Image (cartoon, helix red, strand yellow):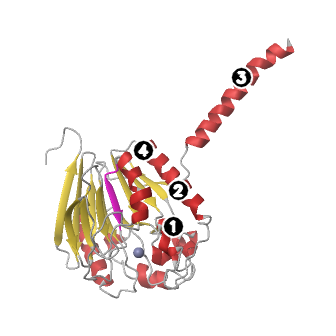
Amino acid sequence: MGTQRSKPSCTIVAIFLAFCCFVSSSKAKLESLQHAPKADGSLSFLVVGDWGRKGAYNQSLVAFQMGVIGEKLDVDFVISTGDNFYDNGLTGVFDPSFEESFTKIYTAPSLQKKWYNVLGNHDYRGNAKAQISHVLRYRDNRWVCFRSYTLNSENVDFFFVDTTPFVDKYFIEDKGHNYDWRGILPRKRYISNLLKDVDLALRQSTATWKVVIGHHTIKSIGHHGDTQELLIHFLPLLKANNVDLYINGHDHCLEHISSLDSSVQFLTSGGGSKAWRGDTKQSEGDEMKFYYDGQGFMSVHISQTQLRISFFDVFGNAIHKWNTCKFDSCDM
Ligand SMILES: [Zn+2]
């Protein structure tokens, strides 16, 4: 009798444990955030990268135009593609560069929204942990920064990815620069876990639009060119999961390249301050739509069926526009 009675309860326990295992193993480990869209479900945001120079190299002019365009488009938030503080990131959570390069520069009313940031290689040359510390959020409540995280806004899922640890040269001899690898080592395990987490999050996404943000280029004809490590390890994952946009900085330019064998648009918005490098690289195999070797930023507007991007120069002129749509209701 006793044995018979224990059988159903054992089965229930086993099912419960299996369910728990399934739930915990299927849940992505990335920090996950929400940002409500406008009442009609649409969303507008600006993208700027490679900016923190205490206003120098036209950072203040770009910031001013971001304020003007941000007002016109009624932007919901701003995305930063990294290299937030030059040359060597922040020294700590109380580094005054945070105010000098961020709070006191992006002062326009339209930019008093959340800033979703990723880290760039220059941020890793300082105290990288400081930029992801909650202390910065107290100093300026616009600041949002984790190493890698997701952001859902109904029709759109954003995936912010920490790309610096992928790049081999930072781990070999890189002109004597020091990098803050706390929390990254052992590197192989960090990268393989990150790829698994991002892949899982992408596969679980049911949003109409998928937008991935990282600091480093995947495809670019700018100074740094393509990032081979991301081409090999990261791009296949974006293609397999039908990602719409990959947005990066690192090259100090504005750029749009269309993938010829997938849905991915490669967008570089790295013109937040120093630019005009004057050199280009080869990037083969995809369609070059636009390249501007100068300062500026990008805007994105997304509704349930349509996506529009525009690039702006330091004078606020729209210098490249592109749009696409989904579903039968497209009427562009
Ligand atoms: Zn960079």
Question: What residue is pinned by disc 4?
Answer: 205
Q: Provide the residue span drawn in magenta.
A: 243-248
The residue located at (21%, 64%) in the rendering is 310
Decide: marks 3, 4 in contact (CB < 8 A)? no
Residue type for callout 2: Leu
Q: Quadrant of residue 107?
A: bottom left
Question: What residue is pinned by disc 3?
Answer: 11
Q: Which mark is residue 194?
A: 2
The residue nearer to you, when weighing 56 against 228, is 228
> Which label sits in the foreground, 1 or 4?
1
- Does residue 197 appear to the left or right of 227 in the view shown? right
- Across and down, in percent, residue 297 comes to 28, 71
The mark nearer the N terminus, 3 or 2, is 3
Residue type for callout 4: Ser
The mark nearer the N terminus, 3 or 4, is 3
Decide: marks 1, 2 in contact (CB < 8 A)? yes
| SS at mark 4 in the image | loop
Decide: marks 3, 2 in contact (CB < 8 A)? no
The residue located at (40%, 81%) in the rendering is 52
